[in-house]
Image (cartoon, helix red, strand yellow):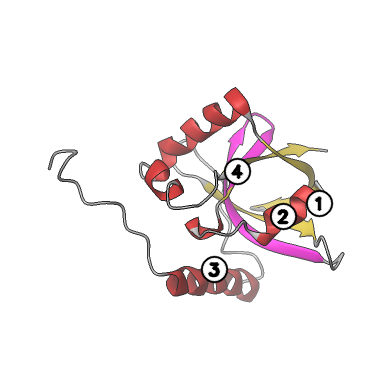
Amino acid sequence: MTAETQKPARLPPRWIVKAAWKFHRGLYKMTGGRFGLRKATDDKWGMMRLTVTGRRSGQERTVILGYYEDGDNLVTMAMNGWGGPEPAWWLNLQANPDASVELGGRKNRPVTGRAAVGEERDRLWDRWRHYDKNLDEYAARRPEETAVVMLEPR
């Protein structure tokens, strides 16, 4: 198949994405954290739990996100399953950048979050392409540029 005849990358319907998120959180809870997170490797992005403070409620909010390591920093994307709106965790992190992450076996690692910009964003985005060849096509479906989020140790 040539580049001109390749089928566009498909995303599952939104209800499937939301159901998968619920299932993933449930699996993590039911197994006491034994399943649901994984360490990033050179060939596969990892999964972490990020806990942020709600911008309106002041309550802790936790999500499971994909990530990879860039030195001591963790890199994720504010993509909301490639849906249009910004994810709530990203809005919360912008309002209060202090957060914590849990990586497989290591809980409550304090971090500060920020958006990568300029050449740094380009470099980190390019690294995500290593993990997902359809990255640019998926991102083009969002109305705004997808933030590349750096989580730096505090």
In the rendered view, tell whether residue 21 sits above or below residue 77: below
Apparent side of residue 146 relative to residue 91 in the rendered image (left or right): left
Q: Residue at x 81, y 51 (%)?
A: 95
* Image quadrant where residue 37 sits: bottom right
Apparent side of residue 37 relative to residue 10 in the rendered image (left or right): right
Q: Secondary structure at mark 1?
A: helix
Badges 4 and 1: C-beta atoms under 8 Å apart?
no
Q: Position of residue 45 (x, y in %)?
A: 50, 45
Disc on res. 91: 2
Q: CA distance from mark 4 to mark 1?
A: 15 Å
Q: Is residue 105 visible?
A: yes
Of the image marks 4 and 2, the number of the one nearer the N terminus: 2
Q: Position of residue 119 (x, y in %)?
A: 58, 23
Q: CA distance from mark 3 to mark 4?
A: 20 Å
Of the image marks 2 and 3, the number of the one nearer the N terminus: 3
* Range covered by the magenta-colored residues: 60-77
Q: Residue at x 65, y 65 (%)?
A: 33
Q: Give 103 or 50, whichever is nearer the viewer.
A: 50
Q: Residues within 10 Å of mark 3 (few under 14, many from 20)?
A: some
Badges 2 and 1: C-beta atoms under 8 Å apart?
yes
Q: Residue at x 49, y 32 (%)?
A: 127
Disc on res. 147: 4
Q: CA distance from mark 2 to mark 1?
A: 6 Å
Under mark 3, the amino acid is Trp
Q: CA distance from mark 4 to mark 2?
A: 11 Å
Under mark 2, the amino acid is Leu
Under mark 4, the amino acid is Ala
